[in-house]
């Protein structure tokens, strides 16, 4: 039987974390000829993840440049990917989630009449500007996709309500949970653990484009207030490389010796820091999936979330970007053992760590 050609394309660190387990599973399968192309939308952070999962791309578009914009990312990918798609001539292109890489890659494949498989399909806020531009990206990719790998029944329902054929939708769980099998270690140690000591570790991540400015200042001020009142917590913030975010963080957190602003962590470090944490404050999407597997309550500092299953399950709480609301919810989790227990013991709605295997089996049967 002739092997089916599968091309996997991704470009950012979060995509890589979720797609590398799928690449490994595809490469093990003798029925597929698998090619990996990275766009380089992120560079150093992407390379770190590839190294951890021992994935070597056959193609690298190397699009990243200083002060890149949505315009430059999209046009560069379209221009550079076209000849590669024509050369490889895959039967399907697999993309992930909602990045500009995902949108531009899907558009390029669509223009060339190549099937698109969308991993993590069907997530929605139905607010086209939140998150921006991700909500547009994922809705647009759904229009073009032939295979929709939805992480949950709720995501599947979104797609059906939008008119996608039910036979094109497969509920697989989320490959983010697969990745934790590779990264989490019970014997993991980091020198910052000595600094944390017996205090409770709070992990903070904040980077969303729509939160930059006054919303981010509100988030940081709420955390600063809690630090002043609670003597037994320490905060670690692997800070995004965006200079605007760094400026706000340095202004709000200056001279506070119980928060460390550190460079972005490699994926093994990051997942193990999450595993050691007491709770997590974030505006990230992926952490909302990973934290429930680790039994960690999450305060989501956004006005919308495309992951309502975690909120419904009780492990995530949407707290927006209002300083007082973040402060009150943060304090409550630190002081109310019953509330903390309820959130940390909630079930994980995002899968069992077998999502990559399920996707490969579906492609075997249907491609």
Image (tube, rainbow, N blue to C red):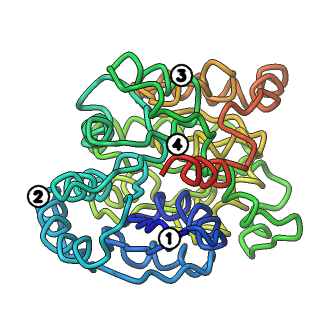
Q: From what the image shows, is residue 299 above or below residue 354?
A: above
Q: CA distance from mark 4 to mark 2?
A: 27 Å
Of 134 and 340, nearer the camera is: 134
Q: CA distance from mark 3 to mark 4?
A: 22 Å
Residue at figure coordinates x 31%, y 62% from the top left: 242
- Tag on residue 282? 4
Disc 1 designates what residue? 2
Disc 2 designates what residue? 71
Of 29 and 99, nearer the camera is: 29
Which quarter of the figure has residue 65? bottom left
Q: From what the image shows, is residue 224 above or below residue 53?
A: above
- Tag on residue 154? 3
Q: Secondary structure at mark 3?
A: helix
Which of the marked residues, 4 or 2, is nearer the chain's N terminus?
Answer: 2
Residue at figure coordinates x 84%, y 25% from the top left: 337
Location of residue 227 in the rendering, given as x and y in whole percent from the top left corner: 62, 43
Q: CA distance from mark 2 to mark 1?
A: 39 Å
Residue at figure coordinates x 72%, y 33% from the top left: 348
The reply to whether dot 3 and dot 2 touch (C-beta < 8 Å) is no
Which of the marked residues, 4 or 1, is nearer the chain's N terminus?
Answer: 1
Q: Secondary structure at mark 1?
A: loop
Q: CA distance from mark 4 to mark 1?
A: 46 Å
Location of residue 34 in the rendering, given as x and y in whole percent from the top left corner: 49, 72
């Amino acid at each position: 039987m002739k092997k089916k050609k599968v091309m996997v394309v991704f470009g950012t660190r979060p995509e890589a974390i979720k797609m590398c387990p799928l690449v490994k599973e595809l490469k093990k399968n003798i029925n597929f000829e698998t090619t990996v192309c990275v766009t380089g939308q992120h560079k150093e952070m992407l390379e770190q993840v590839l190294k951890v999962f021992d994935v070597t791309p056959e193609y690298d578009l190397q699009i990243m440049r200083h002060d890149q914009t949505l315009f430059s990312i999209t046009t560069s990918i379209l221009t550079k990917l076209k000849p590669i798609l024509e050369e490889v001539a895959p039967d399907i292109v697999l993309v992930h989630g909602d990045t500009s890489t995902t949108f531009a890659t899907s558009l390029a494949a669509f223009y060339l009449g190549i099937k698109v498989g969308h991993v993590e399909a069907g997530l929605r806020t139905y607010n086209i500007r939140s998150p921006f531009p991700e909500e547009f990206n994922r809705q647009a990719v759904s229009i073009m996709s032939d295979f929709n790998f939805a992480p949950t029944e709720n995501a599947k329902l979104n797609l059906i309500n939008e008119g996608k054929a039910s036979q094109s939708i497969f509920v697989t769980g989320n490959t983010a949970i697969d990745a934790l099998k590779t990264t989490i270690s019970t014997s993991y140690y980091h020198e910052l653990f000595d600094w944390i000591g017996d205090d409770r570790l709070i992990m903070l991540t904040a980077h969303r484009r729509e939160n930059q400015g006054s919303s981010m200042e509100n988030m940081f001020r709420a955390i600063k207030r809690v630090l002043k009142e609670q003597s037994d917590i320490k905060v670690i913030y692997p800070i995004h490389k965006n200079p605007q975010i760094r400026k706000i963080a340095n202004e709000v957190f200056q001279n506070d010796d119980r928060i460390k602003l550190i460079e972005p962590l490699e994926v093994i470090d990051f997942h193990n820091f999450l595993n050691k944490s007491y709770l997590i404050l974030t505006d990230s999407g992926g952490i909302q999936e990973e934290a429930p597997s680790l039994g960690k309550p999450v305060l989501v500092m956004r006005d919308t979330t495309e992951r309502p299953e975690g909120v419904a399950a009780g492990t995530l709480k949407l707290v927006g970007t209002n300083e007082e609301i973040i402060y009150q919810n943060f304090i409550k989790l630190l002081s109310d053992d019953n509330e903390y227990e309820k959130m940390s013991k909630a079930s994980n709605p995002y899968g069992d760590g077998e999502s990559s295997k399920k996707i490969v089996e579906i492609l075997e049967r249907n491609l």
